[in-house]
Amino acid sequence: HLGINFDQLYQEMEKMIKKLEKELDNKEAELEKLKEILDSIRSSHVSNQILLPIVMKTHILPIKNVVVGTKAEPQVDLKKHQKTTEQKKFLKEAILRNDFLKKLSEEQINEMIDYMQRSLPQNDVFIKEGTNGDRLYILESGELDVTQGSTYLTTMKAGSVFGELAILYNCKRTATVTAKTPTKIWMLERAVFQSIMMRTNNTKRTEIADALRKVPILKQFSNSKLSKITDALEEDTFQKGDYIIREGESGETFYIIVEGTVKVTTMSREYTDSTEDPSQKETFIRNLGKGDYFGEKALRSESGIRGANVIATSPTVRCGTLDKKFFLQLIGTLADKDWDAHNSSVSSSGSSTNSLTSFEGMTLNDFEFVGVLGVGGFGRVELVRFRDKPTQNFALKCMKKTHIVETKQEEHIYSEKRIMRDSDCPFIVQLYRTFRNDRYVYMLMEACLGGELWAKLRDDGSFDDSRARFYTACVVEALEYLHLRGIVYRDLKPENLLLDSKGYVKIVDFGFAKTISHGEKTWTFCGTPEYVAPEVILNKGHDIAVDYWALGILIFEMLTGNPPFNSSDAMKTYRMALKGIDAIEWPLKIRKTVQNLIRRLCRENATERIGNLKEGIKEIRNHRWFAGFHWDGLRKGELKAPYIPEITDPSDLRNFDRFEREEEFVEKEFSGWDKDF
C-alpha cells in the first residue's frame, strides 16, 4: 500500500473520461452544424446567405445572439410607385413564395407592393459583404451572383426574394451580390415596411374595437378587455353567395364584418289555395357592411340556434370571428375593475426598499475589484466589494457609452435602470446604485454567485423534471410581479437567469423590458431569435403574452438542452417558429404533462396562451405539471432547491467561466445622453 486512494483516483479518471466524452460530443455537434451550413450554401435559394452571419457553435449550448431593431414607430413619408398590373402580379407571386412574407395579410402585401421602388445599383456590385443592410429586394429580371469572400455561393434568378431579415432589424450583409447580367430589381426600405405593418395593424385594431363597442353585450367591458377580444378575433373569408350562417342551425360564433357586405334574411312558411303544404319563402331583412356585426347571441345563448340567414353579397367578405367557448375562456365573468384596481395598487406601492437612496454618496472608489463575472459587446460585469467591508460583495455592470450610442440603446438603458430600481422581488436581481464617467455607465447590483443557469445547463446537458419545474416556478413568480406592473420582459432565456446561494433563480438584464398600458401594444423588434414570438416576427405589435411564449421555449430548453426552434440561420429559426410548436418532433424525455403546458404556452395566437387568459398566471400555477408544488414555500424562500451551488466565501468565482480583466482602450463619449443616469 503506497498511500494511494484508489477510489478517489478511479472517480477522478471516470470524471475525466466523461469530460472527454462531452468534448467529443461537442465536436461532433459542431461538425454536424458545419455540414448543415455547407448543405444550406449548396442548396439554399439565397436570401439568408446574404443577410446572416454564420454562427459557429463552440459549445453544445452556444450563447445566443440578441437582436434589436430601431424604435418601431418610424416617421417616414410614404410614397407609392407606379407599376403595371403584370408587375404587381409578379411581385405578389414572389412574396407569396417566401415562407416569411406569405404570413402577412393581403392588405399588407398589397401595400408593400405599392410602396416598392426601383433599386438602381451604381455599379455591378449590388450588395457588398460587411455593409449594413436595411432593405428587402425582389429580382424582376436578370441574374445575380452571390459570393462570400472568394467563394461562389449561388446565382439568383428572376423571382428571388432576399433581404427579409434586414427589414426586421439592423444586420450586416454577409455576402457580396454582383450583377451577372443586366437586371431589374425592386426594393423596400425597413422604415417603410415597419410603417406599413404598424399602421395597418393599428388601423384594423382600432376599427374592430370601435365596432365592438357598439355590440350591446360587449359595452360593459373596459378598453383593455375589448383590446383582448380584438386580438382574439380570427379572420374568415367568404365569396358572394356563401351562407355565412343558416337559420335553424346551431352555432356558437360571433362575426364582425371587416370588409364587404352581406344580407340578412329569414325563412317563412307560405300557404296557398292550391296546396295544403306550406312553401318556404325567403324574406329580406336588411343589409350589413363594414363594422357591422351578427351572431352576437351565440356568445350568451344556451341554445345557439341561429334565427336568420346571413349571405355574402359582395365579391369578397372578410369577417373577424370569435367562438363562444374561447370568449368565455378569454373573458369569463371577471369584473373590469379587477385588473385596473390591482394594477393601480401595485404601481402606487413605491420603489424598492433597497432603492438607490440607501447608497447615495458612494463613489466607485468605495469598491475594490475581485474578479470578472462575464464579458460582452456592451462591456463587462465585475465582482466588487466594499474596501472597508470585504464580506459585502456586489456585481458591477460596466457598459461602454460609445457602444450604447452606436447601437441606439440609450432609451433601453434608462428603462432598465428605472424598472430594476423600482422592483422589489426576491426573484429579480436588485439594483442598488448607478454611476457614470466619460467612458462608462455603471449599475451596482446584487451578486448571485451560483452562476448563470445557462452554464449549468451547458455542463449538465439538460435538467430533470423536478429541477426544471423549480426554476420555472421562480420565473413564474418574477413574471407575475412584472406583468402586474405592466412590464413586458422580452428577453427570457437561460443566459439571463442567475442562481443565488440557495439555488433560487433570479431574472437579470432588463435592457429590453418595457412598461406598457394594459391593452396597449409595443412594436420594437427585439429579443433572442430562438425565443422570439410569432407576433414579434410578423410586426403585429406585442404585449406581455410574448413572455409566456418564451416561458414555453425555456421549459423545453431546460428539459432537452436545446430550444425547439434552433438554427445557425436566424431567418430559418423564425420560419420554424411561424410553423408552430405542433410542427416539431417531441423528444421522448418530455412527458405528456409538461408537453401540454409547453404547447399551451406556445400557441401561435397570443390570446390563447395559458397565462394570458381570464385567470391570468394562476392557470400556469394550477397546471397539473405543478401538482403538489409548494408555491408558498417558494415565495418565503423555505423550499429547498434541487441544486445548491457550492460557494465558500463572498469572493468565490468557481461557478463562473474564467475571464481575465483585460485593459482595453475605450473612447470617451460626451453627448450628454447619460446626464440623468
Image: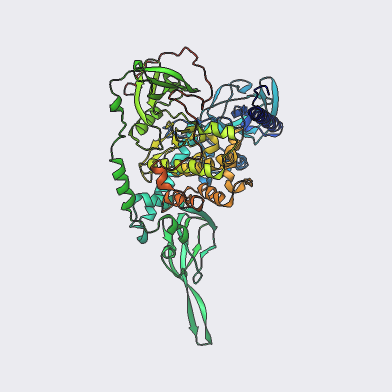
Q: Is residue 144 left or right of residue 452?
A: right
Q: Nearer the viewer, residue 652 or 407?
A: 652
Q: How many marks?
A: 0
Q: Is residue 391 above or below residue 90?
A: above
Residue 291: where, in percent of width, then height?
Answer: 41, 55
Q: Nearer the viewer, residue 255 or 114?
A: 255
Residue 127: where, in percent of width, then height?
Answer: 60, 24
Q: Is residue 156 left or right of residue 402?
A: right
Q: Is residue 628 above or below residue 512?
A: below
Residue under the image location 62 percent in, 27 percent down: 56
> What colour scheme was applied to this rendering of the protein?
rainbow
Residue 453: where, in percent of width, then height?
Answer: 51, 34
The quadrant the N terminus occupies is top right
Q: Is residue 543 above or below residue 336?
A: above
Q: Nearer the viewer, residue 130 or 595?
A: 595
Residue 152: where, in percent of width, then height?
Answer: 70, 24
Residue under the image location 64 percent in, 23 percent down: 3
Residue under the image location 47 percent in, 39 percent down: 196
Q: Is residue 142 visible?
A: no
Q: Is residue 363 left or right of residue 171?
A: left
The quadrant the C terminus occupies is top left
Q: Is residue 483 visible?
A: yes
